[in-house]
Image (cartoon, helix red, strand yellow):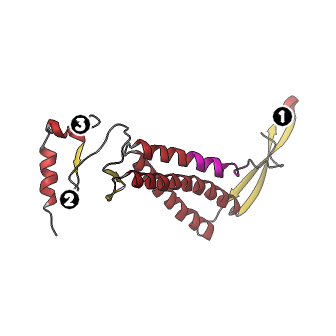
Amino acid sequence: MDHSHHKEISHMAHNTTVPSHHHHPTTSASHSHSHGGGMGDMMMHMTFYFGFKNVELLFSGLVINTAGEMAGAFVAVFLLAMFYEGLKIARESLLRKSQVSIRYNSMPVPGPNGTILMETHKTVGQQMLSFPHLLQTVLHIIQVVISYFLMLIFMTYNGYLCIAVAAGAGTGYFLFSWKKAVVVDITEHCH
């Protein structure tokens, strides 16, 4: 196994200064990261910027270098953020449909003028080793992974990609959340 790239990383870790011709106004020497594989020195931005040259997207081999690539990445990130919002709503809908046992419990509570009122509570249960719960678990894992991908994309500080995340999440919420109607339970008396 070739470990020659560790020498370069070790050298970078001990180097605390960067020559002035490598300094970028949005980065500092302590935030300079070198990525192996012939990519050269790529600076990790620590402030928002709008550009499409040498923008790494999640993986070291996925680098945006043209306006067309940035447009494609914008659309892909926008759709991923929309999918994330749709997945959240779909999970809520599946959860409501998979609720197994419903039990109503009534208990006396003191009312006005010494009267006693009966308050009814609805208890909903779900079985742990059921297909709906296993499906919810798999969908939860997918949702968590997508959410971290979106966070890491936002942390590129590229303005175009940040706008894609925010606009996709907003559009997804707009398109999918209106179905999330408030269900009024006629047996529920406390609103």
Compare marks 1 and 2 and give the one earlier in the sequence.
2
Residue that numbered label 1 is attached to: 111
Q: Residue at x 47, y 53 (%)?
A: 77
Decide if residue 191 is on the left or right side of residue 158: right
Q: Quadrant of residue 45?
A: top left
Residue 92 lies in the magenta-colored region: no
Q: Please provide the residue range marked out in magenta.
A: 170-181
Q: What number of labels is visible?
A: 3
Specify the quadrant that holds the N terminus. bottom left
Q: Nearer the viewer, residue 7 or 111?
A: 7
Q: Which is more foreground, mark 1 or mark 3?
A: 3
Q: Quadrant of residue 127?
A: bottom right
Compare marks 1 and 3 and give the one earlier in the sequence.
3
The answer to whether residue 85 is seen in the rendering is yes
Residue that numbered label 2 is attached to: 38
Please report contact status of discs 2 and 3: CB closer than 8 Å, yes or no: no
Neighbourhood count class around disc 2 (C-alpha, 10 Å): few under 14, some 14–19, many 20 upward: few
Q: Residue at x 29, y 44 (%)?
A: 44
Regarding mark 2 in the picture, which secondary structure is present there? loop
Residue that numbered label 3 is attached to: 28
Give residue 141's position: percent from left, percent from top: 49, 60
